[in-house]
Amino acid sequence: MMITTTLLASLTGASKRQLGYWRKAGLSKASAKSTGHRLYTIPDAVAARTVAALRKQGCSLQKIRKAVEHLRKHYPTDVRQDVLSALTLVTDGDAVYLASNADELMDVLTKQTVFWVVHVGKLILDTQRRALALPLEWTQPVKVGGAAYRLRVSHDPDDGGFTVQCLELPGAIEQGETVEEAVTNGKAAIESVLTYLARRNGKHASKRTGRRAKSA
């Protein structure tokens, strides 16, 4: 699933300007870019929300960068929800820890005098839930046969897939499990509609020519 900058701003509570600053400072990044649109994954969004959480606690940008890099490198995958909900990021600015239970967390905290804490597991679960409920939609320019067209890309929160429809040729509608697949299918749908229109126009032209020949 991919998230646009506008929706990432909604998830993090940060402005687009702040997100741009964080990106330039190396605190956050977009995993993909398509025709001018930066697209973010769930881990990208979680990293950005971690940046926001640490900034609220007064953590410096340099220390946040180290913490986020650690989170990206050790981002949890295929983890049970109960384990994930307890996952906590702790940093003193130099060392960064991901504690997976209360005992590990207390062990880390007793070793530190100054620390910043983010309940990153709960952040991941909340980001996943909120992202799936977002009505994702944007317009993506494409080229087919040397001509420019626009595809309206929309995300279906129910099945997680994507639907594309050509604004210039509304009959060209397709779907895909990913943005890339949906756009590829959308371009193929445009080609199909153009082929159909060319054949129909060719038949109409032949009929008009035939009528003119008879009347002559």
Image: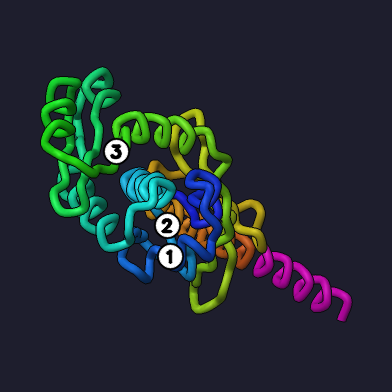
CA–CA distance in space, label 1 to label 3:
35 Å
From the top left corner, tell me how far across and down residue 67 is, in percent.
Answer: 23, 51
Secondary element type, mark 3: strand
Secondary element type, mark 2: strand
Q: Residue furthest right?
A: 215
From the top left corner, tell me how far across and down residue 81 is, in percent.
Answer: 27, 21
From the top left corner, tell me how far across and down residue 128 is, in percent.
Answer: 40, 34
Q: Does residue 181 appear in the picture of this structure? A: no
Side (left or right) of 75 relative to 147 = left
From the top left corner, tell me how far across and down residue 142 is, in percent.
Answer: 50, 68
Quickly name the residue at label 1.
34
Nearest to viewer (mark 2 / mark 3)? 3
CA–CA distance in space, label 2 to label 1:
7 Å
The answer to which of marks 2 and 1 sits earlier in the sequence is 1
Is 207 in the magenta? yes
Quickly name the residue at label 3.
117
The answer to which of marks 1 and 3 sits earlier in the sequence is 1
Label 3 near label 1: C-beta < 8 Å?
A: no
Nearest to viewer (mark 2 / mark 1)? 2
Q: Over which residues does the magenta segment extend? A: 200-216
Label 3 near label 2: C-beta < 8 Å?
A: no
Q: Residue furthest top?
A: 82
Quadrant where the image shows the C terminus: bottom right
Amino acid on which disc 1 is placed: Ser
Quadrant in the rendering for residue 83: top left
Quadrant in the rendering for residue 32: bottom left
Quadrant where the image shows the N terminus: top left
